[in-house]
């Protein structure tokens, strides 16, 4: 309940969180709140689920939250960099994407003890991007899956990871899925 309340408080800024269930009227919203379970958002006909167009469509959904498996994405894009360099390379384009699409981002990395685990976010980015590090002896995967489970069912959730376990569990939790490469392509960042 604490995480859901914190996200609701955070949403008071640029992305308002509804005090009551989201208004019904669209098939996606009605499906998402039916029975108190989240269901993935449908894609328009003709969009492939692993395309940049599909990612852009999902990320423009009102009140959506993007949960990013940090090192899974950065190891796809910049495996030659150290952990701190990978984090720096991902944060700025994610903040730009979040501001452009009005999507809150929860960026999750394994333990803060890895390579000086801090990230300085510029003030404007702080309203859109929250960086989390898993506690000692807890994998980022667990933090990601807890986030998916704790977010209100009425709130669309998009998980970016290529980890099979994360994807399968997030899918069962009603989240939409992006592959790490798909997110990087959507961010338009150069990779190696």
Image (cartoon, rainbow, N blue to C red):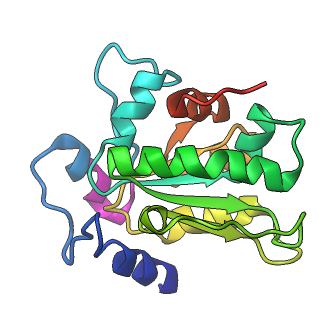
Looking at this view, name the residue that lies furthest to the front. Answer: 122
Whole-percent x, y for residue 160 in the image: 59, 43
At x 36%, y 54%, the residue is: 64
- Give the vertical position of 172 relative to 122 (above or below): above
Q: Is residue 159 at least partly visible in the picture?
A: no
**On the rendered structure, is 58 left or right of 87?**
left
Magenta highlight on residue 118: no
Whole-percent x, y for residue 128 in the image: 43, 62
**On the rendered structure, is 94 left or right of 139?**
left
- Give the vertical position of 109 relative to 138 (above or below): above
Whole-percent x, y for residue 47 in the image: 38, 18
The part of the image, by quadrant, that contains residue 180 is: top right
Query: What residue range appears in magenta?
Result: 31-38
Nearer the observer, 185 or 93: 93
At x 90%, y 63%, the residue is: 115
Whole-percent x, y for residue 139 in the image: 81, 64
């Amino acid at each position: 309940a604490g995480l859901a309340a914190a996200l609701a408080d955070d949403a008071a800024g640029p992305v308002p969180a509804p005090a009551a269930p989201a208004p019904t009227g669209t098939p996606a919203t009605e499906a998402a709140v039916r029975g108190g379970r989240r269901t993935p958002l449908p894609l328009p006909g003709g969009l492939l689920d692993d395309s940049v167009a599909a990612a852009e469509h999902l990320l423009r959904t009102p009140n959506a939250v993007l949960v990013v498996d940090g090192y899974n994405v950065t190891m796809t894009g910049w495996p030659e960099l150290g952990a701190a360099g990978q984090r720096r390379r991902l944060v700025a384009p994610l903040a730009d994407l979040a501001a452009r699409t009005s999507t809150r981002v929860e960026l999750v990395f394994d333990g803060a003890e890895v390579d000086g685990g801090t990230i300085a976010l510029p003030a404007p980015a702080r309203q859109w991007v929250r960086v989390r590090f898993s506690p000692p002896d807890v994998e980022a995967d667990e933090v990601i899956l807890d986030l998916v489970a704790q977010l209100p069912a009425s709130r669309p959730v998009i998980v970016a990871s290529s980890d099979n376990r994360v994807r399968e569990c997030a899918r069962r939790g009603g989240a939409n899925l992006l592959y790490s490469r798909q997110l990087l392509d959507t961010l338009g960042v150069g990779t190696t």
